[in-house]
Amino acid sequence: ARLPARLPGPAGIAQIPGVRQLLVLLGIAAAIAIGITVAIWSRSPVMAPLYTGLDERDASQVVQALQSAGDQFKLDASGTAILVPEGDVARLRLRLAAQGLPQGSASGIAGEAEASPFGMSDFAEKARYQKRLEGELMASIGSLQPVKASRVHLALPKQSAFVRDRRPASASVVVTLFPGRRLDMAQVNAIVHLVASSVPDLDPNQVSVIDQKGELLTANRAGDSSALADGRFRVMQNVEQAYSGRIVELLTPLVGPGRVRAQVVANLDFTETERTSEQFDPAASVLRSEQVSNQQRGNANMGEGVGVPGALSNQPPLMPAQPTAAEPNAAPAANTAAATAATAATAATPSPIDQSSSATRNFEIDRVISRTREPTGTIRRLSVAVVVDNKASVDEDGEVVTEPLSQVELAQMMELVRGAVGYDEARGDSVSVINAPFHVEPDAEALPPPPLWQQPAIREIGKQVLGAIVLLVLALSVLRPLLRSLVSMSPPPPPSPNPLQVLAGAENLNEGDDSRPSVSGTRSLPALPKVGFEQKVGLAKRMVNEDPRQVAHVVKTWLTEDGS
């Protein structure tokens, strides 16, 4: 029985011509794919983050703006960061900032267009309104230049019908400032009044503002003693800075930039004085009104009923004297004569006339009322200190040399400084100008340039050079051997011929005669290609191993032919 041929191993499978060609083609395809990938990678720019931590709305707006401008960008897997070429980061940020992007996560009443569901409760409606109001306030506060972002929290308690049970509303604002920025008291008060004016029945004293460091910015409210002291300090600081700036600006053209230092200490008077005075001038009187009244009563033709009441005109006439027991000798005739004489005297007296007069005069006296309120922040005393560096000049060798100022120059500078600050000796001002050499700091060493691999241009060139090297290595070490193997690969062997024909063909090859007649009973063999001795030996061995009986038969036939 004939044993089955042994199955070839992996090395044997690889030596099969068809499989070998397939592996070569797969290797070439893989090498080409790797080369294309490396080429695309080397040509792609280095990406850097443009914005990170964006919400969905801001990210979509930024992506839409980049797409409309035709800029190259890449969105990360999370959708919160946008990558652009490293060299275009600054340009794209400026352009997007001009368009107001990104706008931030604060969305106000106008920003949301959600429809109110039917049957929404009163609590849910108030919560939605409060949330949107907080968003509007955050957007308004965030528009301030020093503010990078803001958060607003409103506490709006439900109002009661009883006044004693009502609780005031309150608000708190958290601001995140840009690095190096700060809010002064005027800006803090502006934020407080903005929030208080936007919420009904909110007292500005119930609004608190803090920064990202946790510092309470509304600790010094307007009207408090601390706020008043802070305001006075800022006024004094502004006055001192103004005077110092005047001095430096005046002396810089004389000694050069950076060679003058000036400090001013201003003692200001913040006392508030209000005075009211009223003065009268009697000599400067003017008659304003006058009223005169005259009355006269009496009649000369009336003989009776005139005179002063209670005088003789009102007395009864004299009666004649009658003798009495006391005066028994009274003469009636004498009494009658006396009475007659009195009556005649009364008749001869003229009748009196009643006269009265009155006058009322009103005078205006000159009166001066003055109210005087002295301004606060007046200067009580100024103390000025100025330091001037030595003069700098260039000598004959071209080197910079310094020399001290003369006393005349210092005196001139003293006069200039006094005139600049409004020197008043009666006020006790003091001005001091001295000359001293300034300490010159050695030039700082220049920062070393960044490594070449950190420079964007070098990184781009490095990527391209690296890609070219990889492609070259791939072509020389992979593609070239595969193509050479594919070109030099021997053609597939013909189908296994009959051992007799093979051996006959081998004999013909040995004899060098292709027209030798075939063995009896067989047809002539076609011409076989010339092979070498080693190939002949190998072919004979393979045939012996595969079919020894057939080989023995062929050898027997050769021996028979040789014997005949």
Image: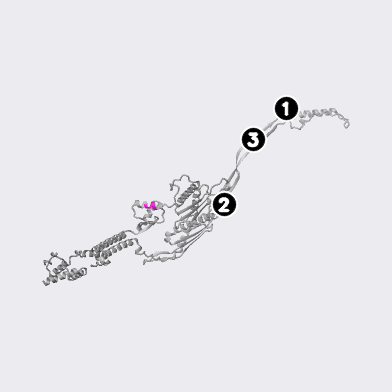
- Colour setup of the view: one colour
Q: Earlier in the sequence, mark 2 or mark 3?
A: 2
- Residue 415 at x, y percent in the picture: 47, 59
Pointers 2 and 3 in contact (C-beta within 8 Å): no
* SS assignment at label 3: strand
* Number of residues whose C-alpha sits closer than 10 Å to that of mark 2, classed few (under 14), some (14–19) or many (20 or more): few
Q: Nearer the viewer, residue 106 or 5?
A: 5
- 324 in relation to 377, above or below: above
Residue carrying label 1: 302
As shown in the figure, which amino acid type bears the numbered disc 2? Thr
Region of the chain picked out in magenta, as a range = 59-63
Give the image location of residue 295, x and y in percent: 67, 32
Magenta segment main secondary structure: helix
| Element carrying mark 2 | strand
Q: Amino acid at mark 3?
A: Val
Residue identified by numbered label 2: 273
Q: Nearer the viewer, mark 2 or mark 3?
A: 2
Q: Check if residue 404 falls in the magenta segment.
A: no
